[in-house]
Amino acid sequence: MYHRVLDNEDVFSLSVQNFRQQMAYLSKNYQVIPIKELLRLMNEGGLRSRHVALTFDDGHLDFYENTWPILKEFSLPASLYVTTEFVNARIWLWPDLLKFVLNNTSIESINFPGLGEVRIFNERNAAWKKMANHLLKYNSLERLAHIKSMASALDVELPKSPVEPFKPLNWKQLKEMEADGLDIGSHTLSHPILSLETKRHIFKELFESRNIIAEQIGYVPEGICYPNGMLDDVSADVIAEAERHYRYGLMACRDVPIASKYMIGRIAAPQDIEEFKLRLVKG
């Protein structure tokens, strides 16, 4: 499981050098297969410890600029799960918006509801982690309201669309990569914590994002990647809706309670190559 490949200290990302090193290691020591092939082998009982599928979340511009060229360099198949309204440049991904606010304030601390005083000066990454974890308990509208209120208190003006280094790629770039072999799936419409939303909103997020991808790319995506993707983020209602519209679903954690193609666990790729090797061995 990957998100961003970028050399920028202002965002949480894997460095370009480390990503290339990981891909070189995989290409030499593992059999990297498309996720569709991995699912087929799972169903037939033919999956082996050396089989690996590469998955990427969100749809930031650095996937097109940094990640895809390296995947092509090593001839590795991959799947990218995009948040469609983000690709349309109509929304920010909320973790990015929070990071933007903290990166652009000159105020040293803030009294944040439910957390008390949070220091920002020289502690921006720690503040982001603390606030982001707290915001996971809110639904989409409540979370956005908190971030907007925080931006106002920290004297930060919010751009309407994502700016560097948080910009999305676009549909033209996605079509170009898809024609070159990239598999594209859904990461919902607007990146909510699905278990906190109503059944109607869950339907909208899964159904409309699938249709937008189909209209833009030319085929119905087979996979849904659940935002945040921890066990608490994927309820029975979410799974039921995923089963209606997709062939499989991806979590963001390794250990899942049941063997299901709608709760496929993933291994998060770390920065360090030795830790990367160890996580692959553990499976």
Image: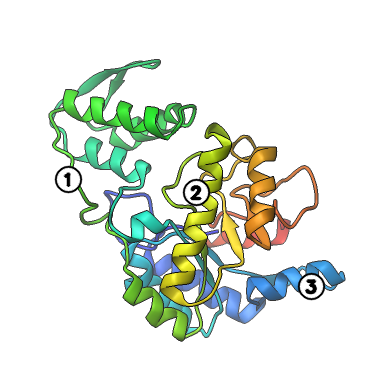
Front: mark 3 or 1:
1
Residue 82 in the image: x percent, y percent?
Answer: 45, 61
In the rendered structure, which amino acid carries the disc numbered 2? Glu
Is residue 64 shown above or below 134? below
Q: Residue at x 47, y 32 (%)?
A: 136
In the rendered structure, which amino acid carries the disc numbered 3? Leu
Q: Earlier in the sequence, mark 3 or mark 2?
A: 3
Q: Earlier in the sequence, mark 1 or mark 2?
A: 1
In the rendered structure, which amino acid carries the disc numbered 1? Pro
Residue at numbered disc 1: 159
> In the image, is 27 to the left or to the right of 214?
right
Front: mark 1 or 2:
2
Could you tell me how far apart the alpha carbons at marks 3 and 1 are, in whole angstroms?
45 Å
Front: mark 3 or 2:
2
Q: Residue at x 44, y 52 (%)?
A: 189
Could you tell me how far apart the alpha carbons at marks 1 and 2 are, in whole angstroms?
24 Å
Residue at numbered disc 2: 205
Q: Residue at x 54, y 32 (%)?
A: 196
Q: Earlier in the sequence, mark 3 or mark 1?
A: 3
Residue at numbered disc 3: 41
Its colouring scheme is: rainbow
Residue 123 in the image: x percent, y percent?
Answer: 29, 32
Q: How dense is the environment of label 1, judged by Cα within 10 Å: few (below 14), some, or many (20 and up)?
A: few
As helix, strand or loop, the secondary structure at mark 2 comes to: helix
